[in-house]
Amino acid sequence: MIIAPSILSADFAELSRDIQLVEQAGAQWLHIDVMDGHFVPNITVGPVVLAALRPRTKLFFDVHLMIKNPENYVTVFAQAGADLLCVHLETLKNPKAVFRQIKALGKKVGLAVNPDKKFAAIQPYLNDLDLVLFMSVWPGFAGQKFIPDILSEVTKCREYITKNSLSIDIEMDGGINRSTALQALGAGANILAAGSAIYNAPDPAAEVQYYLGL
């Protein structure tokens, strides 16, 4: 299991400190939400922030592009230091072309879907992916309540991956806490993006270590 603390809930005035805190606690990935104010009703960080953070940590940069026309931006985010670029199915006119574009940049490919999407929408693209990201909240803001209906779709995805011997990670993002983390893992996810649960905890380092022990 991989825990990917989400900097959306970190202190933006102390990002370097908050990233080092979770890295020292044993986190393997860092989840970076990029929002453009169009695909989702919020604006967060861009490639300049990624480039500034990249020399400060060895964590794997899991960059979640919640933006319209992601094909126009994957190159600049790859150059800024992303290790994985996750694009939303809802934003893609030609999904396979964007996946090829990301792979040509030497980065891992992720496909994210909103809570209303079924596994059937993802299945045609699995052979092109390194990761599937199921949103368990509607994207845009931290601290939302977990939507349990998505768990059955995660299970279908895991069963298909196992049956076909595919090497694909399943990540869940949104409303992850000590209770919902167990539900997510039970459904078949192996990567958890957690923001508020970690950075709003009294001891964020201890919270990271809790998830690593699941």
Image: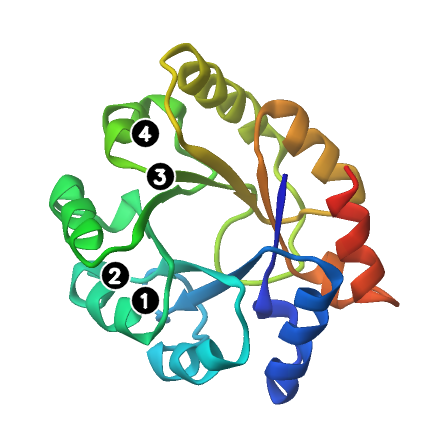
How does the figure colour the protein chain or chains? rainbow
Please report the residue visible at 61 percent of the width from the left and 24 percent of the height from the top.
Answer: 187
Query: For mark 4, what is the residue?
Result: 122
Query: For mark 1, what is the residue?
Result: 38
**Which mark is drawn over residue 130?**
3
Q: Earlier in the sequence, mark 3 or mark 1?
A: 1
Residue 168 image position (x, y, % from top left):
41, 32
Residue 2 is left or right of residue 25, and the answer is left
Q: Which one is in front in this view, the residue at disc 2 or the one at disc 3? A: 3
Camera-nearest residue between 81 and 150: 81
- What secondary structure is found at the residue carrying circle 3? loop
Q: CA distance from mark 2 to mark 3?
A: 21 Å
Residue 9 is left or right of residue 60, and the answer is right
Q: CA distance from mark 1 to mark 2?
A: 7 Å
Asked if 151 appears above or below 129 in the picture, the reply is above
User: Mark 1 and 4 residues: CB-CB less than 8 Å, in contact?
Assistant: no
**Which mark is drawn over residue 135?**
none
Residue type indicated by callout 4: Ile
Query: For mark 2, what is the residue?
Result: 68
Q: Earlier in the sequence, mark 1 or mark 4?
A: 1
Local crowd size for mark 2, using a 10 Å CA cut-off: few (<14), some (14–19), many (≥20): some
Residue type indicated by callout 1: His
Q: Which one is in front in this view, the residue at disc 3 or the one at disc 1? A: 3
Asked if 50 appears above or below 171 in the picture, the reply is below
